[in-house]
Image (cartoon, rainbow, N blue to C red):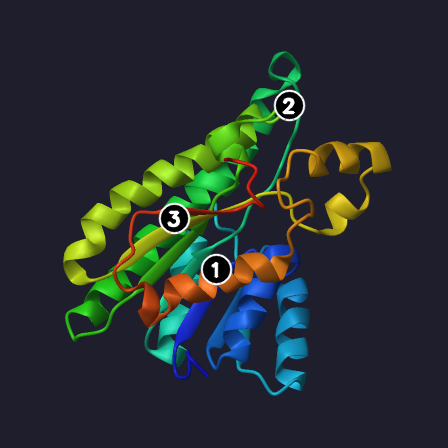
Amino acid sequence: MKFEDRVVVVTGSTRGIGREIAHAFAREGAAAIILGRSAAAAAEVRDEFVRKGLKAESFGCDVTNPENVHEIVNKILDKYKSIDILVNNAGITKDNLLLRMSVNDWDEVMNVNLKGVFNCTRIIAKAMLKAAAKGASGRIINISSIIGIMGNVGQSNYAASKAGIIGFTKAVARELAPRQITVNAVAPGYIQTDMTARLKEDTRNAILNNVPLGRLGTATDVASVCLFLASPEADYITGQTLCVDGGMAI
């Protein structure tokens, strides 16, 4: 139970990678705070965790709205007194070729994927800094993507947002390092999700041809790296981006 008595906030954790990250922390004893745009979906995940004997809480939260984020963070702090770990996972895609991409599609992706990370980190970092003054050490983990490193056709908005997260991670890591708060990013490659399950066989095979390990990743692969980065074993790691991609970016 590596994270007993720790509080972890995971944005976008009602399904997929975010849900598995929250579940992994809860299995290790943390109180997992499930945040999702849909309060009902977040509550469903919370209830599932609680039925398993895990500690969990849920809130509906729009990460693009700083006032809403601030309101939810205050509710978390009122109940749990601290936020030890933040995992910024919330993200969307609005894919299209550049010349066909609408301004709205660009703005929506940047607002959720990048501005959302800014909003949550800025507000929760304040609480972490107060705790650091009393000897606590915070952990911030930002979920980027291999697309933010390699780029991809039809995903200029998504690639820009995820590359922005990497730059943001490095800058904030420098700012918070004096208080022993680490900030790192995780860049997943192609992960088994509902979306990749719907891929045509030839598309799936084309992807696998570019993965040296020859398989898609799992949400557990990503969650395990997040557990490591939040653990004492990673105390001396900050400002880094760990690729969980089966070797795609080699």
* Front position in the image: 132 or 122: 132
In this rendering, would 108 be left or right of 149? right
Q: Which residue is mark 2?
A: 154
Question: Which residue is rendered at x = 29% and y = 53% of the image?
Answer: 238
The x and y percentages for residue 231 are 37, 69
Q: Which residue is mark 1?
A: 225
**First of labels 2, 3 by sequence position:** 3
In this rendering, would 152 be left or right of 136? right
**First of labels 3, 1 by sequence position:** 3
**First of labels 1, 2 by sequence position:** 2
Q: CA distance from mark 2 to mark 3?
A: 27 Å
Q: Which residue is mark 3?
A: 119
Q: Residues within 10 Å of mark 2 (few under 14, many from 20)?
A: some
SS for callout 3: helix
What is the three-letter code of the residue carrying label 2? Gly
Check whether the beta carbons of the residues at disc 3 and disc 1 lie within 8 A of each other. Answer: no
In this rendering, would 38 be left or right of 10? right
